Image (cartoon, grey):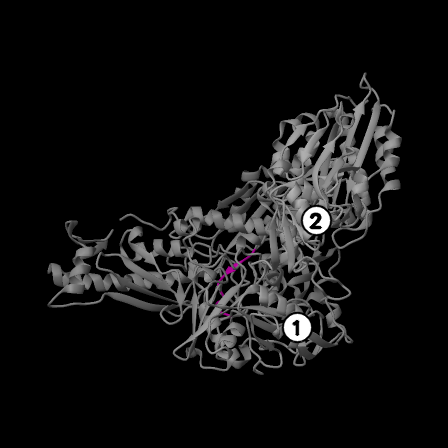
Amino acid sequence: MYDLKALYEAQSVENAVELRLQHPEAQIIAGGTDVLVQMREGKRAGKELISIYGIDALRGVSLDEEENIRIGSLTSFSHITKDPIIQKYINVLGEAVDTIGGPQIRNAGTIGGNTCNGVTSADSASTLFAWDAIIELTGKDGVRRLPIQDFYLGAGKVDIHPDEIQTAILIPKASYENCFGHYIKYAMRNAMDIATTGCSVNVVLSGDKKTIQRARIGYGVAGPIPMRAPTAEAAAQGKPLTAEAVDAFAAAVLEDIHPRDSWRAGKAFRQHIAVEMARRCLVESIKLAGGVMA
Amino acid sequence: MSKQVGQSKIRVDAFDKATGRAKYTDDLCGREALVTRIVHSTVAHGLVTAVDIDEALQVPGVVRIFTCFDVPDIPFPTAGHPWSTDPHHQDVADRLLLNRHVRFYGDDVAVVVAEDEVAAAQAARLVKVTYEEYPFVLDVQKAMEPDAPQIHEEFPGNILGHTEIRNGDYQKAIQEPGLIKVEGWYDTPTVQHCHIENHICTAHMEAGRVIVTSSTQIPHIVRRVCGQALGIPWGKVRLIKPYIGGGFGNKQDALYEPLCAWLTTQLGGRLVKIDCSREETFVCNRVRHAIRTHIISWVRPDGTFAARKIEAFSNQGAYASHGHGVNAKGVNAFPQLYPCPNIEGDAWTVYTNMPAAGAMRGYGIPQAMWAGESHLDDVARALGRDPVEYRRQVVMPVGFKDGFSKNENYFDTFNQVMDKGMAAIGYAEKRKAYQNQTGPVRRGIGMALFWYNTAVWPISLESSSCRMVLNQDGSIQVQTGETEIGQGCDTAYAQMAADAVGIPFEDVHMVSTQDTDVTPFGTGAYASRQTYIGGFSIRQTGQLLKERILSYAVELTRQTRSNLDLIDGKIIRISDGRELMTLGDLATEALYSLTHSEHLTAESTYQIKNNAYSFGCTFAEVEVDIPMCKVKLLNIVNVHDCGALINPALAEAQVHGGMSMGIGYGLSEQLLFDQKTGRPLNNNLLDYKLSTFMDHPHLQAEFVENPEPTSPYGTKALGEPPACSPAPAIRNAILQATGVAMYKAPMNPQALFARFSEEGIL
């Protein structure tokens, strides 16, 4: 039995926008795998809910006219993992969201909910950061797009206006072309767990596959919101595929990340594994891109 | 005669449980039930000075709110032990239904009764409790310090129990020249049972009596505790135990049944329900005692022990529950498993401001094996000996007899289980292959033995009672005071009863529900005793029923009694093997005869004055990713000598469950508390790292079947033993892989990071 005041079910995106304006106090709910848990805990008890879960137009993965990957915000984790477009161009995202919870949660939970929660541990977020994802929001004045880095405002806070809902996540063609990536979720057990730290790395190699043309790295739980490690990325750019280059890249992440001490894990421990994860993710990404370590 | 015992019969409750047809407490609860929400203490130690319920009472749907100022001033014990008629051996009565003097963060202060869960939850949030806060202590040894906060007036120094072992002359023995000293401190965490069904109970009144339905392992004991807590005659309480979703010892305690029983008496006898959330189950039920153990061994170069010392400090938490019995059991195993003439042992059980610790699968032995078996590998390493080969030298010999329990090591069990485990996992080759590894990822193989004994004789009463009733068709109902809690005892009992009476397995109908109004007296499921203890009264009662059947058959067949037998549900003339009639025909005649009608039943009690050792071991193989501070369990094998197997498939399943629990104990599980406030940090199934299916390799169960001479079916303990040795076996495998000895469970990544850093291998 959930302590909720009212439930409004949006029939379309326009209807969702109307409901948002009519019920400014209401909480948006999609798959409910976070909102209902919080409600049960009393954190959002007694709230009104606007369910957008029935808006099928927000489900599915496609390529738009510019060949950007468009992921509808209500696409479930299990659908993302099994989607052929995802598997072809950004398989790492499918692998990342396949580490969330268990099968039932992955069937119900959505990538839109995962990002709108604004939490640093979201398993999709580090990969979306590392692939320069664009968040699409729809409100009464139409569509607004912004880079995912700008979407996250702080822990648990994202940039959604009172009339908006998130409608899609886009991966630009320039981001995924010739790009290969790997994600490591570091958790205390192999299923049903939250990331202690998540690390997602991707690379584009030079035409001869001898140097790193571009390396990007995103982290979850390395700070209050997901983040990139620009110092490390710069350290790798143009470097040959050597152990030294990989080590330099990995060591440089400490310039960028600032994990905290908590009862879940200590700061020194998180820093240690963050470096190791960066190293392993980069080596794996190079391998996926067809590179051979010197 | 086809023998049912020894066959892998399908569980008698399998279909109903798999299809959702089986009724559990909540399924049986009427929709008219009032629901409750308990208001828990938000300080670790203090005195409630006021409870303001005015605002909470305004919530629509709230019926009543009871506080710690309303409950009877009758302290009561909760432990699921048989009652002792000797006042000196009775369990400690140290809590009230709701407590003014709160002793841990989560103690019960007030209870909201409402028409629905939402109203109860809203009102519970509005109850304002004012405390006079006291200093608190969480650590067991700090609680023993002279200036530590005092938690119970009757127990100065917070010492709930202390027992000592003084064998030989330790101080003199350690003077022997040339001894090698091996010393270590070994810590185990506070963990919880995590049974699937949280504790739940309901109560209502009928004919002036309180009827309690509960998810409990121990219906007759809980009935007694309810009577004690309410100050009413025990016969005024009727306790019903339907199917339950696991217990593992947590439900071997009176939990919220006394409060629920009292609530209905305050609500005009209306049906009322207390349904624990998972968060409450973690901290407001019972936990496993965290035990810190200090061991010193003085070893001669030939490996023999000159002297040994053990001190074990058990964190009792806020209330006595099972108390000192748990640590005492663990420390008592110490001189038995590896005998040594000079032993000094001390077991301390100490109150702290932590959740109350009670019974949990293994009852002190998983803690004792973590310490003792980790230490044994430390000794073997100091001597440069192979851990298996060294154990063969020093382990309890065949013929060893414990003076107190009179338990005897009849067979060469330890060597047999080690042989079987070594072969199953490929110990010798792997141990050799994994020597002197370098590199970031290394493998290791390790093992641990365990000591266990079945049931509680001679410390407590051991008796079992059984009733059998014959139906018209020759089938029977069987009732026992022993309880099915998911472990499968109903199925084992049906097999035993079939053999004892001489009827097919399918003709035995187990009455799974225990109802203290109609079920024979029994103390319930604990101490791995159900199959061993239940077997005595089932055999005896079955023979009694068979005798009555055959006496009646004499009348019907005009044959002599000595020439008749009951085999597979048929009356057989022994001399020529002819089937004279079916049991169904006999039973129908017996009930409807116009000349001699008789209701054929049997009922008896058997008092057991024995106990049985149940030994075994675990072998574990790990891969340690040193830079990632992670352990991957590659293979694990448990080998048990639990006597003759009653149902091999169920025995194997029992071992799998225990191994899973042991893996979590070793690698991931621990309840954490904020050191500044005593607040539990991870009392939910996300943050408490119960091991999952994905954390397990194939769980291999092997058996050595030495029939237990004292049991009518040759059986002995298997419920708890599987959880006793996996953790130290994994620890010893990590030791081989990395050379790093772990001293604290769980060996989670954070703990490995700390130790690997200390040892300089990162």
Residue at 47% in and 53% down: B642
Dot 1 amino acid type? Val
Which residues make up the magenta segment?
B451-459
Between B124 and B528, the residue placed more toward the observer is B124
Is most of the magenta stretch helix, strand or loop? loop
Between B126 and B337, the residue placed more toward the observer is B126
Secondary structure beneath label 2: loop
Total numbered badges shown on the rendered structure = 2
Q: Chain of mark 1?
A: B
In the rendered structure, the answer to whether residue B623 lies left or right of residue B135 reads left
Structural distance between the alpha carbons of marks 1 and 2: 39 Å
Query: Could you tell me residue B609's position as x and y percent?
Result: 43, 68
In the rendered structure, the answer to whether residue B19 lies left or right of residue A59 reads left
Per the image, the residue denoted by label 1 is B127
Secondary structure beneath label 1: loop
Q: Quadrant of the C terminus of chain B?
A: top right
Disc marking residue B748? 2
Which comes sooner in the sequence, label 1 or label 2? 1
Q: Check disc 2: other Cα within 10 Å, few if <14, some if 14-19, many if 20+.
A: many
